[in-house]
Amino acid sequence: MKNRITAVAAAVLSFAAANAMAAPGDVIGGGNIEFKGKVNSDTCYVQSSAGGSKTILVEMGDVNTTDLANSTLANPAIPQSGDFGAATFEITCSAETGVKMSFAANPSNLETGNKVLKINDGIGGEGLAGGLGIAVYPNRNSTDAFDLTNGVLFEQNLTAGQKVRAQFAAAYVKTTGAIKAGTANATLPFVIVTP
């Protein structure tokens, strides 16, 4: 056993000595730098500080079930401060054109007259919130929710390269059944078309 420990110690010291004697310019380590991205060719696109050219990320934050107990479509629990529940983004077009940005959710993923988006794709289970959906409004003070199948979020004529800022607010609203705590995520598609 003593001979084996001595042999291992000698090998370690030999390796350390070889590294300590490295001459300037000797390669002693390395790796790779990876670049990842995607180039799109959309004529008009959105830019968001959170997201990319096809994604607007809305942080809903942590909300307590008691704060949502009385929330309805006409009385949403929209956060009134901070960035939670709000999105500001820019629309840019490469050529002069009229632009209309509309929501494009599948009705099967909606409730309450197509105005409430099901959370977690309508799936319940361990760790997933329930009894809630997400409604989208023109601003934090509005009580008139968008139709999420075709509601127009933005419509304007733009010149080439012009950046126009748009915004909306979102809130969790009570739907059916008891409110259950857990993850409450959703995805809402949109389209940009020429009106």
Image (tube, rainbow, N blue to C red):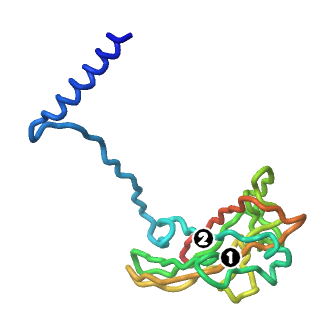
Measuring from the top left, give residue 3's x and y in whole percent.
32, 10
Q: Residue at x 71, y 59 (%)?
A: 183
43 to the left or right of 108: left
Q: Amino acid at mark 1?
A: Ala
- Count neighbours of disc 1 (C-alpha within 10 A) and say few if under 14, some if 14 to 19, many if 20 or more: many
Disc on res. 160: none
What quarter of the picture does the C terminus occupy?
bottom right
- The answer for how far apart the CA atoms under marks 2 and 1 are is 8 Å
Q: Residue at x 35, y 12 (%)?
A: 2
Q: Is residue 125 above or below residue 29?
A: below
- Count neighbours of disc 2 (C-alpha within 10 A) and say few if under 14, some if 14 to 19, many if 20 or more: some
Q: Label 1 near label 2: C-beta < 8 Å?
A: yes
Q: Nearer the viewer, residue 155 or 140?
A: 140
Q: Is residue 170 above or below residue 2?
A: below
* Residue designated by label 1: 170
Measuring from the top left, give residue 113's x and y in whole percent.
82, 73
* Residue designated by label 2: 58
153 to the left or right of 92: right
Element type where label 1 sits in the image? strand
Q: Is residue 130 above or below residue 15?
A: below
Report the residue that reaches farthest toward the bottom.
141
Report the residue that reaches farthest toward the front.
2
